[in-house]
Image: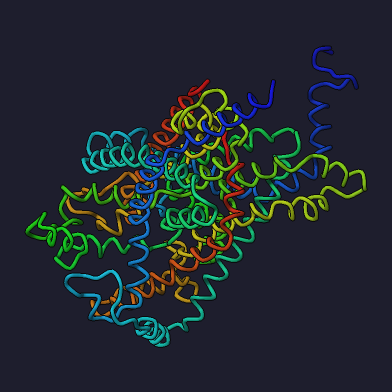
Amino acid sequence: MSTTNTDKYNLTRRERFVRDVKKNKHNYVLMAPFVILFMTFTILPVFMSLGISFTYFNLLETPNFIGLDNYRALFLEDDIFIIALRNTLILAVVTGPVSYLLAFVFAWLINELGPRLRALMTLIFYAPSISGNAFLIWLLIFSGDMHGFANSYLMRLGIIDNPIIWLRNPDYMLPVLILVQLWLSLGVSFLAFIAGLQSVDKTLYEAGAIDGIRNRWQELWFITLPSMKPQLLFGAVMQITTSLAIAEVSMHLLGFPSVQYAGHTIVTHLIDYGMLRFELGYASAIATILFLIMMTTNLVVRSVLRKVGD
Amino acid sequence: MNLFKRIKMHYKIKKKKKLNRSFWGSMGLFTVLLLFGSFSAYPLILTASNAFKPLDELFLFPPRLFPRNLTFDNFRDLSALIGDSWIPFSRYFFNTIIITVVGTAGHVLIASMCAYPIAKYNFPGKTLIFTLVVYSLMFAPQVTATPNYIIISRIGLVDSHMAIILPAIASSLGLYLMKQFMQQIPDDIIESAKIDGASEYRIFFQIVMPLVKPAWLTLIILLFQRLWIEDGGVFIYSEELKPLSYALRQIAQGTIERAGTIAAVSFVMMIVPVVFFIFSQARIVETFSHSGMK
């Protein structure tokens, strides 16, 4: 047989594969439960979603193949989807980079503090993202009458005369949503940055001081950022994925559906068709588009970030 | 080099290091931190303080951040409403405990079991699985919600706690973080255990698992806070299987005189994950120092 595919025991590629699999039997056993669940609930659904998106399917009748009709309807007939797409992109373009930057800047500032103060500030910034439904308090802060905290403060300062109906006036709805979303956004990437900053080799800073690094900005640019690149990449993935999936806060604060669909996003559109109208074919087309947007953004940003500092 | 020169150089280095931290720079940075820190803390403090305000203070004009007359009435009202409900309240609480404890424990165990071979061995299929896991971090779970409903209903899990627990167990972020953390365990430890004749499974359960305790806490907080507020959604429709979050929301969905109770509910839902984080913060941060992506 071919000699290129053999190793020192004279095994073909196929035999070597079988040997490797047998040798690692215990590894497959350990991995089996997770892999089975992961494939069933994460990977398989992506392909199912793609498949169903070419059909008309309402869960009761068998799916009916209709080709690209769902996609055509989405882009050409569904005005609300275009609004949702627009809102999603605005939200992502603002909250994605801003939250990423904030997470890094705060982590960096906190890193200058002593251990106790650092732990306190970490808690203060991270707590909103694990506080469950605590974001509902913004309903009270942005309440449309003069009892709302925002209106009350602004009126007493003389900035406005009449209360603003923050959550029902399309001019203010997206900005409020962005504000609340940013408040919630210091999550896992923030923790990753804090940890990354703490694990930067301290001797690098001393060496840098000798080599003529003069202030903390230079220190940040020449030493800190390059050492933290892996955490920065991880954080980018987390922030991009979250910023494109905004829905829950919008539904609770702005209503579902929101006034003039001003708070409607791709995910709320998906929930509308998937969970309320049970038009699963159409919902799957929405999900597939969202999947493609998320993957492309992530892969593009990742390849850009990888090049930084090389 | 004479002594004088050496001292001078030492001084120079010291001076340089001091230059790195200018006084006004520090003041500026701390002002920024204080400002944004207040912004971050304000809504949480308001949530907490509202839970202890008497009803008339909740509708005060101008509104106040802190209560004037601290009261526990809201919590008393909450427990009274709980006593009145159709299903014994302990039932909702029990459902949430089942979902959170089984889901979180299952996730820590099963994700660690999968992370260990990926972190420490080379074998066919490993790269494929890990690549899929990393890609899965790039899309939100909402993408797979619809097909997931179909899958769960076909398996026959609709209206059971497993409909919530099983997908949560296979959360890919947990596997990713655990694998990154396990990679820094020295190979020597595993090798020497092997020489002592320990089986692979024993090495995993008795040596590797205790070493990755900081990562457990991270996986626990990430999944716990997600399952703790889980309300069953479309998956659970039987009243006696519904979790706490659902019941508390039902109570909160009242008219204006329920405002105090709503505040108490928000406080209860918020405080549990936050307290857990306070006690495990140091080790959670430690885990994330290995979270980096290539």
A167 lies above or below B269: above
Q: Quadrant of residue B126?
A: top right
Q: Measuring from the top left, give residue B262's x and y in whole percent.
A: 33, 74
Is any part of residue B262 visible from this angle? yes
Instruction: Residue at 39% x, 81% y: name it.
Output: B75
Q: Quadrant of the N terminus of chain A?
A: top right
Instruction: Residue at 15% x, 47% y: name it.
Output: A171
> Hey, which residue is sitting farthest left in the picture?
A161
Describe the colour scheme in one phrase: rainbow
Q: Measuring from the top left, give residue A151's x and y in whole percent.
A: 16, 60
Instruction: Residue at 44% x, 40% y: name it.
Output: A104
Between A60 and A254, the residue placed more toward the observer is A254
Q: Measuring from the top left, give residue A292's x and y in whole percent.
A: 41, 34
Is any part of residue A52 visible from this angle? no
Between B199 and B178, the residue placed more toward the observer is B178
In the displayed structure image, the side of residue A198 where residue A107 appears, left or right: left
Q: Measuring from the top left, give residue A267's x and y in whole percent.
A: 35, 47
Q: Quadrant of residue B12?
A: top right
Q: Quadrant of residue B219?
A: bottom right
All told, the count of numbered labels is 0
